[in-house]
Image (tube, rainbow, N blue to C red):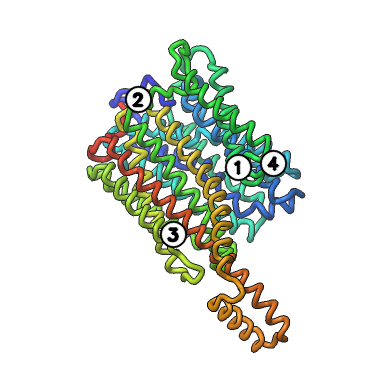
Amino acid sequence: MANPAVRPLEELNAYGSTRWLLLIGFVLASILEVLDTSIINPVLPTMAGNLGCTTQEIGWVSTSYILANVIVLPMTAWFSRRFGIKNYLLVSITVFLVSSVMCGLVHGLNQMIVCRLLQGAAGAPLISVTQAAIAEVFPKKEQTIAQSAWALGITVAPSIAPTIGGWITDNYTWPWIFFINVPMGLGAMYVISSLYKGKGPQKVGAVDWLGIGLLAAGLGSIQYVLEEGQTNDWFQDALILRLTILGIVSCALFVYWQLAPRNKTPIVDLRVLKDVGLSGAVVVMLVAGTGLYAGLFLFPLFSQSVLGFSPLKSGNFLLLPGVVLGGTMIFTGGMMQNKVPGRDLAMFGVLVEAYAMWRLGHLTPMSNESDAQVALCLSRMGIGLLMLSVIVAGVGNLKPSAVGQGTALMGLARQLGGSFGIALSSTYVVQMTQFHRYDIAAKVYAGNPEATDRLNMIQGALYASGYDLEKARQGAAELLDRQVSAQAYTLAFNNAHVMIGVMFALTLPILFLMKRTAGGGGEVTAH
């Protein structure tokens, strides 16, 4: 995706101090994409009522955005070479803003889905293209601090987006979650169009239509299966089964075709994965995306259903962890700038994240707010240490011409990790809740002394508060059933976080694939 003919270092000095203004423009552009991935989540119930559809149907508002994003993302490097980074970036922002306004003006679900498809396709390149542009604009010695500021935006934004979405909906109306993109996007466009000198289109040869078709069929099918599988009872549904087969076969053929010697112009250059550092970074980013987005998905459900939080309180509860994440990103960037090996920071981040998941895996229905808050803050600290250092280290040993493709693959891994994390954690929690409920309910039987004592205690409390004997008996049975359900869900929630923690711990050996050089696995070169 980055320009193969990268400017000599002396030419970079032509940007002067304007490179820092450019950085702001690049950060704003990248925030657009990640913000709209999660800002919509707390708004979906309200949107369903306004658009006249069910809560299951409204899920396609999120699914359509992710589908388009995942399909287009691996192709951004090719489009950047074909049309030029600057042109592609400006057109993408323009289409993103137009589709955002259209999303806020629609009156039906089908219109919204089409607009979100356009928005997702336009937003797909904003992260990888801006990172490649930063690698082009900044000299080697400033790469770490520039990439740190950029990574801060794309990591913090999804953490605070649900809070922003909930606040906007409570104080205004849901269309404003789309309209707020306009000032940010216009600011990014003005800065980039005025200051960025990105080179124009390059000759890339014939269009790899077969590769595009296989990629769209493979990732689109798999994404649909992940999003809708739980709702449709997975492989018991004929469509889910067929799309699973189509997705696996298409992805396998896609990989074969992209690596085939007779394919002279592959849409995705998978050969860059020969670099073991990048390959390791892609795997780690997949896990990091899983942990970040699964955590954002699971905790609001647990806090509202078990701890009794309101939706607004649940969203606000994530603000402090978001601040911790931002502070950690700044700290990590400073440490890498001061020549602390990025691999060491990544390993420490993995350990912190695994410990945080262990703490989240030991909450109870009686846990207080501070227990959850400390665990969430530790989790965001681990993500901040890990993700930034891996992003910089992953492209550190690549040639400048391959940086764009490397960032696109890491971005795809992060996005797929998020999708996998949400889908798999949702399925896992449902199944484990059923398992634990059956296990607990089997122990709550007539004649069990502990169950009898608990039931009598609840019944006595209800009777003392004014209920007649029969209503107190019925109420006690209902409350005990609720306690069983809450305990079962809590255990399932705990299991999911322990599983995520194990996944993070298993990435430690992978991090050894990266060179232990100061500032990362190498630095993003721009010369």
Q: Nearer the viewer, mark 3 or mark 4?
A: 3
Residue 213 higher or lower than 448, as above or below: above
Which comes sooner in the sequence, label 3 or label 4?
A: 4
Disc 4 is placed on an element classified as helix
Residue beneath disc 4: 112
Residue beneath disc 2: 274
Residue 273 higher or lower than 120, as above or below: above
Disc 3 is placed on an element classified as loop
The quarter holding residue 145 reads top left
Identify the residue shown where x is 47% and y is 56%: 495
Identify the residue shown where x is 55% and y is 65%: 440
The circle drawn on residue 444 is none
Image x and y of residue 489, in percent: 55, 61
Label 1: how many Cα within 10 Å (few below 14, some 14–19, many 20+): many
The circle drawn on residue 361 is 3
Image x and y of residue 132, in percent: 41, 31
Q: CA distance from mark 3 to mark 1?
A: 25 Å
